Image (cartoon, helix red, strand yellow):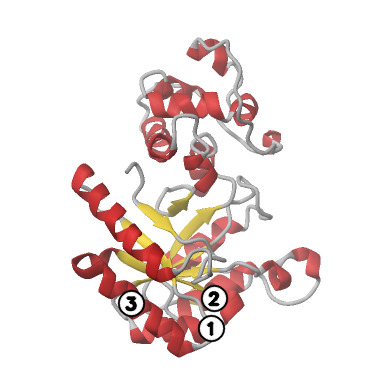
């Protein structure tokens, strides 16, 4: 109810413990109820990955049939690295109108600097745009839990701009459709403002399972807190809070927004590292039962 985009997990296909013909009808009911209650559109990304192109097509058709009038609110997730570029092409050519969600799970086997072989994540994401992905996971510049660095920022520009500079060459896309960066892996509302400030914009899709479902007040409030994390950054950027640091601006916003304030109370380890003095500023003296993953935020510039 609080989010805009929800997805199957990348390993979730049509397993015996979560069969598609039982799961998808329940998803349709939940989406319909959420859209009616909020008056807002929702997008569900259904994993159609399979080892047989015909099976992928059959699953996709079944999902669209179940969605009915909400078919345009359905994306197809394909594990592009595991199943290969052919699987992505099968989905794109057979369902040209659907948002095609390229999940890169497993890519680190060839893109990680530790492998000393293969190709970079930068090259991988360029290939995803060439074969027609609507969105692909791009990393979080080490703001989340996954391996990454500042070069992730260049990936976003390469996916979205018509002309972009890579590490060696300039790429002219000649009007080829954009691919949306999808950020995920250890993100929550408290990590987002500094992430957006480093990236320079917030034109991305955020998938934050822990950031939403881990929130002390539940997933709805967790999802809302993430949206508020973005809004707090935008207001700080616009000078709403005067000449203060980004961290102080976010805390100021949280004083009047319970969901974001709840994120401070939930992810206290992140709060302590990113927002010094937040407890005093928010008037909080209690303890939290939830602790987020640790991260060396001293490397990041927050003001």
**As drawn, 270 above or below 197:** above
Q: Residue at x 45, y 74 (%)?
A: 48
Residue that badge 3 annotates: 62
Q: Which tag, 1 or 3, sits closer to the chain's start?
A: 3
The residue tagged 2 is 80
Is the residue 135 above or below the residue 266 in the image? below
The local secondary structure at tag 3 comes to helix
Q: Nearer the viewer, residue 238 or 65?
A: 65
| Left-right relation of 224 to 108 | left
Residue at image position (62%, 58%) is: 151
Q: Mark 1: few, some, or many residues within 10 Å (few <14, many ≥20)?
A: some
Where residue 180 sits in the image (x, y, percent)?
42, 63
The picture quadrant where one finds residue 72 is bottom left
Q: Earlier in the sequence, mark 2 or mark 3?
A: 3
Pointer 1 residue: 85
Task: Name the one closer to the observer, 23 or 158.
Answer: 23
Which tag is nearer the camera, tag 2 or tag 3? Answer: 3
Q: Is 216 located above or below residue 67 in the figure?
A: above
**Callouts 1 and 2 close, C-beta under 8 Å:** yes
Image quadrant for the C terminus?
A: top right
Secondary element at image label 1:
helix
Query: Along the horizontal axis of the image, is 153 left or right of 132?
Result: right
Tell me if mark 2 has few (under 14), some (14-19) or many (20+) residues whose alpha carbon lies within 10 angstroms of its own: many
Instruction: Tell me where residue 117 appears, x and y as whole percent.
Output: 78, 75
Quarter that holds the N terminus:
top left
């Amino acid at each position: 109810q609080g989010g805009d985009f929800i997805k199957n997990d990348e390993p979730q296909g049509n397993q015996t413990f979560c069969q598609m013909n039982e799961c998808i009808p329940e998803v349709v009911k939940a989406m319909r109820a959420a859209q009616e209650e909020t008056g807002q559109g929702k997008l569900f990304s259904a994993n159609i990955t399979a080892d047989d192109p015909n099976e992928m097509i059959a699953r996709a058709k079944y999902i669209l049939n179940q969605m009915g009038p909400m078919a345009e609110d359905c994306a197809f997730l394909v594990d592009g690295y595991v199943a290969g570029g052919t699987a992505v092409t099968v989905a794109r050519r057979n369902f040209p109108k659907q948002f095609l969600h390229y999940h890169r799970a497993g890519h680190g086997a060839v893109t990680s600097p530790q492998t000393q072989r293969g190709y970079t994540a930068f090259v991988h994401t360029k290939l995803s745009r060439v074969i027609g992905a609507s969105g692909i996971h791009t990393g979080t510049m080490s703001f989340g839990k996954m391996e990454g660095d500042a070069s992730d920022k260049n990936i976003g520009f390469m996916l979205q701009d018509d002309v972009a500079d890579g590490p060696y060459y300039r790429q002219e896309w000649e009007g080829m459709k954009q691919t949306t960066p999808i950020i995920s892996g250890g993100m929550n509302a408290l990590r987002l403002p500094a992430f957006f400030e480093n990236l320079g914009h917030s034109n991305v899709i955020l998938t934050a399972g822990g950031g939403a479902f881990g929130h002390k007040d539940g997933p709805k409030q967790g999802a809302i807190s993430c949206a508020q994390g973005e809004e707090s950054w935008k207001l700080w950027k616009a000078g709403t809070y005067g000449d203060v640091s980004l961290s102080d601006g976010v805390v100021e916003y949280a004083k009047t927004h319970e969901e974001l304030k709840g994120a401070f109370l939930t992810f206290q380890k992140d709060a302590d590292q990113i927002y010094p003095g937040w407890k005093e500023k928010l008037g909080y003296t209690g303890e939290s039962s939830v602790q987020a993953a640790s991260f060396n935020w001293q490397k990041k510039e927050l003001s």
